[in-house]
Amino acid sequence: MGTQNLDIDGQGNVAVQIQGDGNSVTITVGDTSLVLTKRHELRFEPEAPLDLLLPENEVVPLVGRDDVRADLDAWLADDAPISVRLVTGEGGSGKTRLAIDLCRGAEAGGWTAGFAATEEMARFHGQTNVEAWRPDKPVLVVVDYAATKGPVLQRWLTGLARMRSLPEAGKLRLLLLERHGSRDGGWWQALTQFGGIEARRLQRMIDPPEPIGLMPIAAADDRRRVLAAVMAAASALDGREPPLAPPEPGADPWFDRRLADPSADNSPLLLHMAALAAVQARQAHKLDRSRTELALELADQEILRLRKLAENRGVGPALFQHLVAAVTVEGGVDGEGLQRLLTEEGAALNAPMSIDDVHARRNALLAALTPPERHGAAPAAAKLVDAVRPDLVGEALVLRTWEPEPDQFARVDRCWVRAPAATAEALVRLGQDFGTPTAAHAPDPTPIRWLDHCIDRVDDLAGLQTLADAMPQATVNLRVQAERALSRLIEVLESATEPDGLRIVLTRGNRALRLNGLGRPDLARADELRVRDAARELARHDADAFA
């Protein structure tokens, strides 16, 4: 396994390196480099049922997305040298799958394309002479979970605004993916609406100005194709011949009506989960289940698989299930993080701590939770052990594992200490997906209790900012938690040795929106007045701050 250097003629001593058997690409201009993960090259042979749900495996062709895909192709082809776009959609709407397909198409068209991890974004911006970085080949950078990368994204976007132009051949496209985003408040407003001259330049680079919402799959025929493809793949993995398939048109009137119902949940993830659960249950379909019910069913099956693996490797099944839940809350861990997690969790749960025990648990986690990029990749891959994916099934597994435990809050606390930003993000997703009622299911209060617990106890600035940014701007059931997270964030910001005035103003403005949503206009008005006065004071010292 080596590194292949591809010399590209052009200015600035540009080299592109393909690393890790094609799993990543390094764009080097002079002394400045950017490493992108080529998720469109991470397909691997599924070994476990949940592997069929990973977007990297592309079990189903991209269906029902012709219009949005064509619009993204036009965005790439546009003459603008630098352009930024935000695509939003609920968890499981297919944002990542769409971006993977776009990266493959862009690469075929001569672009360098891939996903940028948080750590890589920070490392790239920390290099010298970043603003002089001028690749002479078009580059597409995809950023997933964009809201939780606010601080480093702010630095990136400011730098892009200062760059202003690129060589004609060196277009740059930044595609952001997130569940939510609004120009009227929250993380997207904070990134794009304030900050003086650079913000005005940035706003001209955002195309379109409003986030693009990704809708459910519209056509019943496309939905049927998704179900059939996943059921065929799941049957093959299960050794079933002939494979199970959804009912033929006309064979099941209820199924036909449900499949054609535009008001039903027809997101790609629900269809994938319904197909997989149907094969596991030996049924023709599972479209009578909600997404949370399906996620819990699949989590139960995954727990059985994990416990069997643990028994075969001489690891306590209950302890192993807990370790998987902790890894999932922390969003996956690297080698150092895994060692710390095993040591701390073993001590906290009074589990044996011999070298052999730790080694057995480590190897079991490596066998159970291999990240897609490590299938055939170099050992230097960032995440040694991944979370249970997709997110919704991982959240369901965490609930199943920790909800019955009397020390559940202590388990959450330990994850927060090790990985505050990732834990904050996981808790908000849990609250969104399982803690809020829908027409299909009643809420589970446990994720809300975990969220409240962290908001009350945490004084970590990065963690509180992540909590606040991860809250959907239009949320109803989490709006109390959103307001409380913003209030705690203001407390921490104002108590800093050198308070960040602009950040406090933005946070107070967002809290005013939350307070209005809670029916507390008097408190909202007080925040609005303080924002107005503080903005005037800031503008007096920096004329561009609110230009």
Image (cartoon, rainbow, N blue to C red):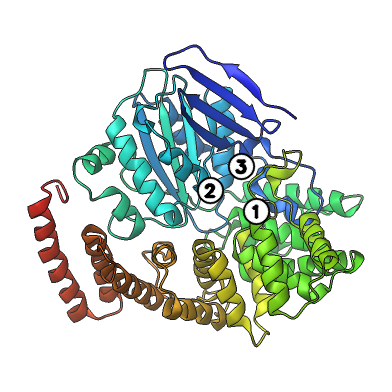
Residue 7: percent from left, percent from top: 56, 15
Which-is-in-front pick, marks 2 and 3?
2
In the picture, residue 489 is in which quadrant?
bottom left
Residue 177: percent from left, percent from top: 47, 48
**Considering only order in the chain, which callout, 1 or 2, is on the residue closer to the N terminus?**
2
Disc 1 residue type? Asp
Residue 283 shows in this picture: no
Q: CA distance from mark 1 to mark 3?
A: 35 Å
Disc 3 residue type? Val
From the viewer's side, name the closer residue of 351 and 255.
Answer: 351
The residue under label 3 is 63
Name which residue lies at 37% across and 66% down: 474
From the viewer's side, name the closer residue of 71 and 323.
Answer: 323
* For residue 121, side relative to residue 545 (left or right): right
Residue 319: percent from left, percent from top: 77, 74
The residue under label 2 is 95
Badge 3 crowding class, 10 Å Cα cut-off, few under 14, some 14 to 19, many 20 or more, is some
In the picture, residue 478 is in which quadrant?
bottom left
Which numbered marker is on residue 334? Answer: 1
